[in-house]
Amino acid sequence: MGYCTRTDIENIIAQALTTATSSTLDGLTGTSVPLTYVGNRFDNDIQDSDIVDDFIRIADSQLDGDLSELYDTPFSEVVDMETTLYSDIDAYNDYIVLEKVFPLSPGDQVILLQGAYEERHVIETVVSSTVFATEDPIGFFFTSGARVVRVSYPNPIKWISARLASANLYDKYFSSESSPNTSTFGDKLREIAGADINNILNGTIILHGQFRIGRRFVNSNLVDQYGLPRGGAISKDVR
């Protein structure tokens, strides 16, 4: 799994790469595509999961290369939210109800922990800021008080990867149908992703929970350190 998910890609470009009419047959089931899919789901005949995963992997590789100057890559997930279950999960209630209010979004990844049991799930539907459902069924009946943690890569890593992957996917499967050149939409996504990368490189954005590595330049003639916008200094004799 990469820095972003298929859901993240769909949220960015799904309206451009969906089936055009409700009479079109779904590539997986062979049935007519519901009207609710138009503008919200990928056309499975064109963009299957393997193709999307390939574009995510390419975007992640580019991101790792750009930021390997300042951080040890690939990046690691960190816990950005922790709470407990408010109510039990059983055969009659498969919704996860949290004790505390948190901002939740479809595509977020959560881990349920109780004793020796641990399950990882992706949020599919958010009912409220404390109630959500997962894409896959929950296998163990966790009880009230079980730990719930949300894990993610530090912002804005996920959305940089998603925008780069979406731009390349859009240009190949949509824009190329009408023009051999890159699209304005794809260029805009790359521009936003590039701005975030530059903000990380110049120190405006700090990736918390990640391991930083040496200086920008280390040689006998020049000693330099990457930006520390919040103050502080690194001894010049540290290599």
Image (cartoon, rainbow, N blue to C red):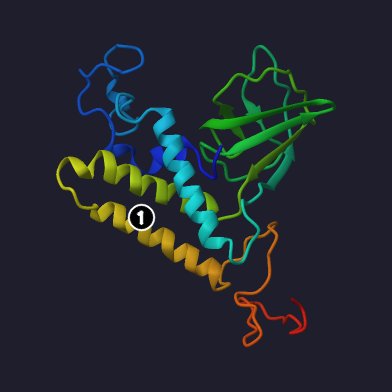
Q: Can residue 76 be seen at all in this image of the molecule?
A: yes
Q: Is residue 42 left or right of residue 57?
A: left
- Which residue is located at x 23 percent, y 52 percent? 183
- Which residue is located at x 57 percent, y 32 percent? 122
- Which residue is located at x 73 percent, y 22 percent? 88
Please tell me whether mark 1 sits on a helix, a strand or a loop.
helix
Q: Can residue 156 be seen at all in this image of the molecule?
A: no
x, y percent for residue 115: 85, 27
x, y percent for residue 26: 30, 18
- Which residue is located at x 35 percent, y 12 percent? 29
x, y percent for residue 77: 66, 46
Q: Quadrant of the N terminus?
A: top right
Q: Dot 1 corresponds to which residue? A: 189
| Amino acid beneath label 1 | Leu
Q: Residue furthest left?
A: 178
How many numbered badges does the structure rendering display?
Answer: 1
Choose between 65 and 88: the one closer to the eye: 65
x, y percent for residue 154: 61, 54
